Image (cartoon, grey):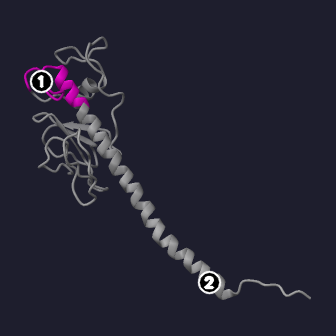
Amino acid sequence: MVARRAFSLIELVIVVVILGVIAAIAVPRMGSAAETAKANRLVGDLRTLQEAADRYTAEHWGKNPGVDTAGSPVSAATLVGRLTGTSDEDGTVAGDGIYGPYLRTWPSNAVNGKSRVIVGTAIASPSTYGWRFNPQTGSFTASAVGGPTVEVTGSFSGAAQVDTAGGVRNLNELGSIGGG
């Protein structure tokens, strides 16, 4: 008779323990990778919005998309229309406008899932709004409380730096945190 060689119970337990240790190391890394991906998408969308606003401002003689001809803040619908549609030299959204569109679609905030925008200097509620446009400075910030936070350093043409301990900073006002 030929003796069969099989794994002992101890050998099987050791293999299961080793697999458990590997899983304990790998699972948290996958979770943080998903959070980092959301944060990177948020930074990319914030850059895209800021670039669109900057292009609009350049083509409309220095007037940013968040103000009317008198310099007063416009509605959120007007802001979105100016960046996703075409407009004339005065910023009037028209199907046959000669300027724009600057965005194909309006992005949703990768952290809180909201695509609504508020125009003004008040802090945007992350449970209601995804974005805030400050008509005084012509810059965007993202509402990101309740999710991973991102810090953008440098201008929008520079490199982004993800910092999971900071707040969401817009691309032009490096000294103010807009994560509220």
Image quarter hosting the N terminus? bottom right
Query: Mark 1–mark 2 contact, CB under 8 Å?
Result: no
Residue 51 x %, y %:
24, 32
Image: 62 above or below 89: below
Residue 10 falls within the magenta-colored stretch = no
| Res. 98 mark | none
State which quadrant residue 73 falls in. top left
x, y percent for residue 81: 27, 24
Residue pictured at 32% horizontal, 44% vertical: 109
Residue at image position (33%, 51%) is: 39
Give the CA separation, mark 1 to mark 2. 70 Å
* Quarter where residue 13 is shown: bottom right
**Residue type indicated by callout 2:** Val
Disc 1: which residue:
62
| Left or right of 169 on screen, residue 37 | right
Q: Which residue is mark 2?
A: 13
> Element type at marker 1?
loop
* Magenta stretch, residue numbers: 52-71
> Crowdedness of circle 1 by 10 Å Cα count: few (<14), some, many (20+)?
few
Q: Position of residue 163 (x, y in %)?
A: 26, 57
